[in-house]
Image (spheres, rainbow, N blue to C red):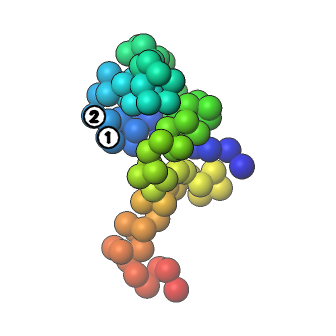
């Protein structure tokens, strides 16, 4: 099962591309280049996503289900807006 994290969700968490790059300091011992995250597509490369998830547990809510295209956060929010749809 692939590990999918949207770049937009990670940017929301770390605020800037430089912030995303700095998030790798505790993982790699140094930041990524600031340009690296700008070159990612819609989804973060799986290796980098796994590394982020190991160190930033709060990102688990942003994991995307490949079959639905929705993150756990999006599913939870849609159920809160429309509780009848969950039954």
Q: CA distance from mark 2 to mark 1?
A: 5 Å
Disc 2 element: loop
Residue ID at (65%, 55%): 67
Rendered location of residue 84, percent (x, y) = 43, 85
Rendered location of residue 20, percent (x, y) = 38, 29
Residue ID at (44%, 45%): 56
In this view, the residue farthest toward the left is 15
Residue in front for this viewpoint, 24 or 10: 24
Q: Is residue 84 above or below residue 50?
A: below
In this view, the residue farthest toward the right is 1
Residue in front for this viewpoint, 83 or 56: 56
Location of residue 18 by image quarter: top left
Q: Is residue 55 visible?
A: yes
Rendered location of residue 25, percent (x, y) = 42, 25
Residue ID at (46%, 51%): 57
Circle 2: is it few (<14), some (14-19), or many (20+) Cα within 10 Å?
few
Label at residue 15: 2
Label at residue 40: none
Disc 1 element: helix
Location of residue 80 by image quarter: bottom left
Circle 1: is it few (<14), some (14-19), or many (20+) Cα within 10 Å?
few
Rendered location of residue 86, percent (x, y) = 49, 80
- Asked if marks 2 and 1 touch (Cβ < 8 Å), the reply is yes
Label at residue 12: 1
Location of residue 78 by image quarter: bottom left
Q: Is residue 38 visible?
A: no
Residue ID at (58%, 39%): 50
Q: How many labels, in total?
A: 2
């Amino acid at each position: 099962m692939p590990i999918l994290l949207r770049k937009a969700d990670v940017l929301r968490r770390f605020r800037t591309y430089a912030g995303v790059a700095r998030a790798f300091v505790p993982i790699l011992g140094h930041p990524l280049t600031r340009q690296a995250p700008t070159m990612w597509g819609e989804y973060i490369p799986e290796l980098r996503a796994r590394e982020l998830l190991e160190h930033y547990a709060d990102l688990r809510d942003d994991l995307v289900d490949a079959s639905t295209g929705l993150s756990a956060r999006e599913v939870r929010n849609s159920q809160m807006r429309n509780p009848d749809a969950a039954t």
